[in-house]
Amino acid sequence: MKTYLVGGAVRDRLLGMAVYDRDWVVVGAIPEQLLAQGFRQVGKGFPVFLHPDTQEEYALARTERKSGLGYHGFDVQFDPSITLEADLSRRDLTINAMAEDEQGNLIDPYGGQQDLAAKKLRHVSGAFSEDPLRVLRVCRFAAKLAPFGFVVAPETHQLMCDMVNSGELSALTPERVWQEVVKALQTNMPSQFFARLDSVGALSLLFPEIAALKGVEQPVQYHPEGDVWVHSLMVLDAAANLSDAGMVRWAALMHDLGKGLTPKALWPKHAGHDQAGVPLVSALAERYRIPKKWQVFAEQVTAYHGLIHQGLNSEGRPHLKASTMLKVLKACHALKDPKTFALLLIACEADAKGRLGFEHTPYPQRDFWLAVADTANHVDRKAILAQGLSGPAIGEAIEHARLQLVKDFLAKYR
């Protein structure tokens, strides 16, 4: 029985990146041997085991044979005679098909180290096309490794296009697509995930709401970067620079979906696009069974980013009425959940900075809205209750007090 470190841990170490997760392949063993050593089996389709101390995954060397549609359509074989090279041959990319033995020696039967040096994402074999999920995985690796200058090899790009055209991506479940999206959102350049999906024709199949933004014109004085698609990707990367929260990054990408509905005759203006985009955000969230918190957050960013931008005018003075500001705060749950509201303001800041030439422009709206929210939350409830009010009158008094606090706060700017 021999054990090898495989996949991403080997790749990332060679790239000089921090290694957080380590996966292992065990060659020449049967499940009973690992169970006898205290490993816990977790795999269903094939034996995967958790180490009793490290909880890292150990999988028996295996091969796969295509037997049906989708990424579940495989017959998996594992026995002690399967070699490490055979196991590595079923992996997606050459840079993920390397291993290290227990002495730290590199085992690279498919040229992964050479492709690392050439900064190429290249498939290991024609078996790549048997799993439609690999189209999304390659796009995710393109995003993960974009800061290093990696590109998809031409032959792999063509293979991905062929897979999309074959229609097999329709076999992917919503949950599995969303898992890849979440991982892609955690990369330094998540825009590249969606750009690569678009380059192989997968974006319009999986995310037609986003694809509809391509070529949609905006006012050039505010958006010199070009159409809404380009702007949305810039906003996504701006959000990645401002926050590690995947929820913020997703909402940043979603915020302008409504512009895809604007009749061309009305371009480059998009009046009402924020509210118009909310049903699109909702439908996409339901289609991919996105967590409810993410859905609500993206809906709020989409619906209210325009008003958030208008909090202060170009002269640094309040632009909206106190009643409108209070309406926004309540709709965005700022008074009940100020931490999430702070994240919403980061998404709005990403929108402002995700424009050509505006990347480093200050965004005073964020601190301003935080101050307004904090002010509105300082209602003296004890004083209101001391008035002897009851029932709905208490809520009305609190609302009136909040409005007055906001009015007094805004008066300081004048």
Image (cartoon, helix red, strand yellow):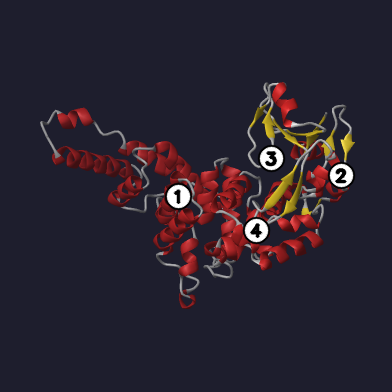
**Badge 2 or badge 3: first in the primary sequence:** 3
**Badge 1 or badge 3: first in the primary sequence:** 3
Q: Please say whether residue 400 is visible from this viewpoint.
A: yes
Q: What label does residue 268 carry, if any? A: none
Helix, strand or loop status at disc 3: loop
Kind of residue sitting beneath label 2: Gln
Q: Pointer 1: residues within 10 angstroms few (<14), some, or many (20+)?
A: many
Q: Marks 1/3: CA distance?
A: 35 Å
Kind of residue sitting beneath label 1: Gln
**Badge 1 or badge 2: first in the primary sequence:** 2
Horizontal placement of 378 versus 154: left or right? Answer: left
Which residue is drawn at the image coordinates 42% and 42% (left, top)? 341
Q: Marks 1/2: CA distance?
A: 41 Å
* Quadrant including the N terminus: top right
Kind of residue sitting beneath label 3: Phe
Q: Marks 2/3: CA distance?
A: 28 Å
Circle 4 residue: 69
Q: Marks 4/3: CA distance?
A: 18 Å
Q: Residue furthest left?
A: 388
Circle 3 residue: 46
**Badge 4 or badge 1: first in the primary sequence:** 4
Helix, strand or loop status at disc 2: helix
Q: What label does residue 295 carry, if any? A: 1
Foreground disc of the pair 1, 3:
3
